[in-house]
Image (spheres, rainbow, N blue to C red):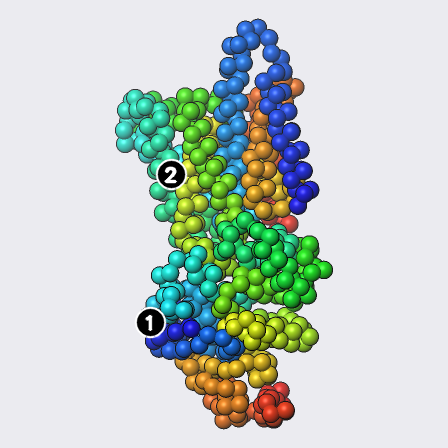
Amino acid sequence: MVMAERRLLVLAAAALLCIAAFLAIGLRGNIAFVLELRLLKLAALVQVGVAIALSTVIFQTVTGNRILTPSVMGLDALYLFGQMLMIFLLGGIGYVALDPQLKFGIEVLLLMALASALLLPMLRSRLDMGLMLLAGVVFGVLFRSLYALLARLIDPNEFAVAQTASFANFNAVRTDLLVFAAIVTAVAAVVAWRSRHVLDVVSLGPDTATGLGIGWAGTVTGLLLLVSALVAVSTALVGPVAFFGLLVAALAERIVGTRRHGVLLPAAGLAGIVVLVGGQTLFQHALGNATALGVVIEFVGGLVFLLLLFLGSRK
Amino acid sequence: MIRIENVSFRHRTAPILSDVSLTIPKGGVVALIGPNGAGKSSLLSLVARLQPLQAGEIEIDGLPVHTTPGRQLAKVVAILRQDTTVASRLRVRELVGFGRFPHGRGRLTDADHAVIDAALARFDLTDLADRFIETLSGGQRQRALVAMAFAQGTDYLLLDEPLNNLDMYYARELMRSLRAAADANGKTVVIVLHDINQASAHADRIVAMRGGRIVADGAPADILTPDTLEAVFGFRMRVEAIEGKPFVLHQL
């Protein structure tokens, strides 16, 4: 147990190092201006890393499955669908004219409502992993298709509005939502931290958890709403990312060697920061090609997914 | 006291329990026996509010189980289900520690640690305390799960086939521990058993079920007779008395 905490400290140091490197490397010209720009971007990257990492860990605990992530289950596709639905109903002008924070608020609530309507019946019967994966893939395809259908129905100018929001881009984050998103992320992180013992018990499964005094349906609903809010934050800021959460959660668990949420939650958040901020620094300065970070993360994350699937099927 | 009144339960259209009423006074070991599919596990999980109650009433110490807050009930009754699996990567001590969750919501005090150590010692797990659950044998894992239910420190303990996977030595040790807990600490143990002779040796009372109904209820000497056993299990078996207790030679 002491070892887990020591490794957590190492992870924290690595995260700080990445942040320092991101801010300091190649700093020249109007330092105040550059620093402000970098700080804004850093704030967004940290938030996205933490939001995706926490949502993935919580989602895996609730579903009792280490291969599922919110995005494998099509939650971010659902978010984009909700966004497109709003553009479709309000029109491109009406959508753009909306206050971005109000818009974001509506999108978050929409995702929470849709996600709990979809996932709760599935969780109640606690399907096995194969069925969950299959259902997730079907949901993902369904929402992407609905999204594409709506995209064909609206006029091209409005589609351009939607398209800017629908690609993962760590280089052009939406800084206008930053403050609002930061509040959502911070509140969600506090709630997740306070639920760490409950999450430990939830990971024992519905029967044992109920026997230990957890109200299963209520607890799971609350946790799923939390996951939805976090997914909405990250998708709104950088767009959908499929395997980043899986990569970070698997990495964190491997590093600290425990599934205790008091250690795992901070470890996952820190690993998210290391991969995202560290990766972005590397790509910006060492490789001079910043747009590819999303691709690389998805590639490595996809490999981890296949590896976990392969190892899991052998047990 | 556990009071079960007119409880019926169906899974989709298949009836599992039909109008079951049973009162279990505080203190003692009650064995639930019966053939596969008799409804023993369903009855136990209804008492432990793991399934929604469809018809009837169940109370433990006057608390209606399906409306009392889960937290409050978890300090009164503990359940170990059949085939409980631990998906999470946990050490034995951590798993047993979860038994204290209803008391401190995850914060372990010195008193909690003492209870955990006692439960580990009681089930011979002290040497295995730092092992991961997935590295244990089936019987060791079963003992860890029983220790967790014990650590919960409740007056009522519901165990669904806890002797699964246990060898003869540990099966006997577990039954003795339950007997001791009932005698020394006034605990109430309701246990589903397939080994009828364990029930004969250690239980105060045997409740026999068949087809979702209670078909016999009484002291071991009254239940373990060839006629009653045939009514419950559907075949005749020899019963011999050893040291005044009936033993069933169902293998013959």
* Residue for point 40% across, 36% down: A79
Task: Please state if B85 lies on the left or on the right of A216 as rendered.
Answer: right
The percent coordinates of residue B244 (x first, y second) are 60, 92
Label ID, residue B56? 1
Classify mark 1: helix, strand or loop: strand
- Marks 1/2: CA distance? 39 Å
Write down the residue under mark 2: A111
Question: Residue B177 appears in which quarter of the rendering?
Answer: bottom right
Chain under callout 1: B
Residue A28 to residue A288: above or below: above
Q: Are marks 1 and 2 on the same chain?
A: no
Residue A181 to residue A138: above or below: above
Residue B168 to residue B222: above or below: above
Is the C-beta separation of discs 1 and 2 under 8 Å? no
Quadrant containing the N terminus of chain B is bottom left
Classify mark 2: helix, strand or loop: helix
| Amino acid tagged 2 | Leu
* Residue for point 56% across, 44% down: A261
Along the line of sight, which residue is nearer the eye, B245 or B82?
A: B245
Task: Please state if B197 lies on the left or on the right of B22 as rendered.
Answer: right
